[in-house]
Image: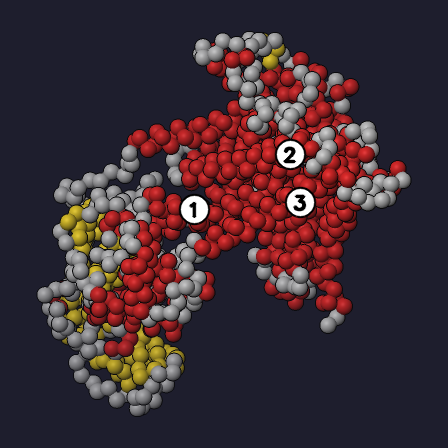
Amino acid sequence: MTHVYLDKLTKVYPGANEAAVSDFSLDIPDGELVAFLGPSGCGKTTTLKMIAGLIRPTRGRITFDGEDVIAIPAEKRGAVMVFQNYLLFPYMSVGDNVGFGLKMRGVDKRTIRQKVQEMLELVKLPDISDRRPNQLSGGQQQRVALARALITEPRVLLLDEPLSNLDAHLRDEMRELIVSIQRQLKVTTVFVTHDQEEAVLLADKIALMFEGVLQQFASPDEFYQRPISERAARFFGGVNFIDANRNGNKVETSVGNFVFNAKNSDNAPEGDSVLTIRPEQIAIGHDVPNGENVVTGRVRSRIYVGTYTRYKIAIDDCEIEAIRSADLPGEINEGDEINVHFPSDRIWFVPRNSN
Amino acid sequence: MATTQNLERTTSMQDAPVITEAKSPLAGVLRYAAIGLILLFLLLPLLTFLINAFAFRWFYPQFFPKELSLQAWDNIFAPNFKVGEALWNSTLIAVVVTWVSIIIGIPAARALGMYKFRYKRVVEFFILAPIIVPGISISLGLNINFIRWGLSGTIPGVMLVHLIPVMPYVVLTLSGVFANYNADFEDQARTLGAGPIATFRYVTFPAIFPGIMVASLFAFLVSWSQYILTFLIGGGQVITMPVLLFSTVPGGRNPNIAALSLVFIGPAILILILTSRFLSGKSAIGGFGQI
Amino acid sequence: MTFWERWRIPIMLAPTMAIVIILFGGALYYGFLQSLGWQPRIGNTELSLDAYNNILFAGPQTEQFWRGLVLTLWVSFASTFLSAVLAIGSALLLRQTFVGKRVATFLFQFNLPIPHVVAAIGILFLFSQSGLISRGLAQIGVIGAPNQFPIVVRDSLGIGIILSFVWKEAPFLGVIVLAVLQSLGEDYEDLARSLGANRWQRFRYVILPLILPGLLSGSVIVFAFTFGSFEVPAILGVRFPRMLSVTTDRFFRDPDLNSRTEGMAISMIIAVIVLVLVFVYQWLSRRAIRQE
């Protein structure tokens, strides 16, 4: 249980013009599970390695429970990293791999053996201590790597892309395991991912990074309901962006005038801005009654995707996307003129040209 | 409570401590000193060739000779020294051995690199055995057969024996290439109308070309520097560069030996530089063990 | 199964296997027969172990053989070990980033294509009593005359021979180790650091086991080569003791055809010793790696 604080962390690699990470500040409370999310090359792994002590920051401070750890070398820092490709030592048995950290600390063999068994049980692989890493499946290797990290009772657990090398069916299993172990041990955990779905599934809070700069640090649903920029919204699957002018709860757009009364509306930009709404939150259909925030549009195309249908709808010069559950009654066909409802508590605003 | 922090790029950094990248300067000095010592050990012997080859009356305590001359070069290029013949023989033998070893090595390497078959380990063992068994152990047994076949003392005979140490490295290098080769490209070419020859010419050959260059480099160098097999099979009648150099060492004058050595290593270094861009990764280095 | 499918692999292997079996295997076979006294050209087709007996136990060359065997083992073990140590050190130095790394790496690999004959001559020029180092020491007044410089080439301990082999093989093994280190990257070490391993522990428990397979197979090549190598000990060796390959060559060149039988016996012994040692070494190192 460690409170991790990053203060204006900056990394400029030798010979590089741009900083890989710029003035990255973040407050990670005790025992929280935080994701660093961003496209590849956004500096998230660099930040992770700076916390681990494997990369020295150019500027900035890292504290664990208020103690500055910059000068503490990685091997003594207690921030253990689990690498993306697991990196089990191929020349050691599974048990020796898990016990590695304790061996480095000079712990006696009996204690090591006992702790190894505990850890393997924790990751639900109690009987594989004598096997070789190359005899394990990817999911098993990932668990062994996790056990190897946890055996040292780290102050901070750092995971690099923990689910990205796993098949879809293993991801769920692994996700549940990580979350349950994390809840059980209450170890402050940071993981890095380029996949917003992975971040949403695992994290208490997500730090979104673009080009080495922190964009938004918030809980997963914030990113869906209240993204900070068009780019952040697009990263989370947002597709509808309509130029707007907001004045309090009055909104003018090219497709019509709307009323806005979302929660936490203070953070939404006023004046010239961009209205955004998620496709699944738009209500469409012949049966949608006329009224506030309802406009008419024409169905351009529809794609049936099994549990739902995705529609492209033209409203004046604007095209929006909406999703409708396949269970709902009433058929909507290409070319139909239908009502489109933008719920006043679901629309949101991001700055114009903000990128 | 607003959970969303709007974090703009802030430029104030006065309150953040500055950490420098520099490691301890002593470590840097020690590293350069260690690298310097190693390189000195590796390069000084080469320097002695340059000094000796151009030295004239290089009396003892002098570190560098006071007088330089091209006398040694005149000596070794005099007709009775046979440098021309040795260079020609060495080049002819190395080039032919390289070509032959590549042509017969490609199918074997493909079989070993791409297919599983019975007794594969046994075949590998036999092909690699000449790396382990020294040339001196096979030279006399070879000689008996070569005398019988009339190949002893002939250039074709020498070429043939050079294949023994060359083949393991050629097959080893090329089978590594074939192990990472995707034969689906060949099937793709066939379905697009390419015959077997066109498929090899336009698909297989370009894919394995870098490996062929590396294998050729090793084949050439192993043949070029081969002394004992050449001498015992050539029976003193086939003069190559290593045979000539080796016979000059006892009783020869240092400047002549040095100049001859430089003539000998020049083409080897040239060939390495020409093919060096194909050398990468650990699979590509094995051949240097036996030069 | 068509003809081609059935015979494809044997046909592909045939030319190379022909070289190996007819030339290499045939040479070993006839060499072995000859070591048993089989010389049809002088009418001797009876087989006996006399030559082995003369060499190993009761002949004028017995002492030369045993002393030669000790020297050969010493030279090849020492050369292999020193080359491996120097190779690991060099590779660890060269993989770091520093100004001049490209030049240093290029120079480090420069003598890879240089033949062993030339290596021996270079060591002779450098380390002989009137060689470059002796001259350098004389220049700064450490020694006054060539004979004050220690005899390190053409010495009975084979130091000059070992120096030549290390000069040739350390870069060879070094490049292998460097390639392994570069292909591994630094992730394993970073991981070990984050699990608490200090600098020495990272070398002992991470780097060494990871480079060991490549280093060991390279060392086998080096050992086998140095054990049977002829040129270097012929140039840098002394008359007694002689390395086994040089003794063999002396027998071969003897005008008395009977001595060829003994030469062949030694060369068979060389082959057997190398093969046995290589097998034992491989077996031990595999086991050691498994136990790590």
Label 3: element kind? helix
Residue B95: % across, % down: 72, 39
Image quarter (top left, top right, bottom left or bottom right) of the N terminus of chain C: bottom right
Toward the right, the furthest residue is C43
Q: Looking at this view, is A199 or A216 the one in front?
A: A199
Task: Chain letter for mark 1, please.
Answer: C
Label 3 Cα neighbours within 10 Å, binned few <14 / some 14-19 / many ≥20? some
- Quarter location, residue C33: top right
Q: In the rendered image, which residue does mark 2 sit on?
A: C66
- Above or below, A24 against C257 in this view is below
Which residue type carries mark 2? Answer: Trp
Question: What colouring does the structure picture have?
Answer: secondary structure
Of the image marks 2 and 1, the number of the one nearer the N terminus: 2
Q: Looking at this view, is C32 or A83 the one in front?
A: C32
Q: Residue at x 52, y 9 (%)?
A: C145
Label 2: element kind? helix
Q: In the rendered image, which residue does mark 3 sit on?
A: C272
- Above or below, B251 against A48 in this view is above
Residue A139: % across, % down: 39, 68
Label 2 Cα neighbours within 10 Å, binned few <14 / some 14-19 / many ≥20? some
Determine the CA span between mark 3 and mark 2.
Answer: 15 Å
Q: In the rendered image, which residue does mark 1 sit on?
A: C208
2 vs 1, front mark: 2
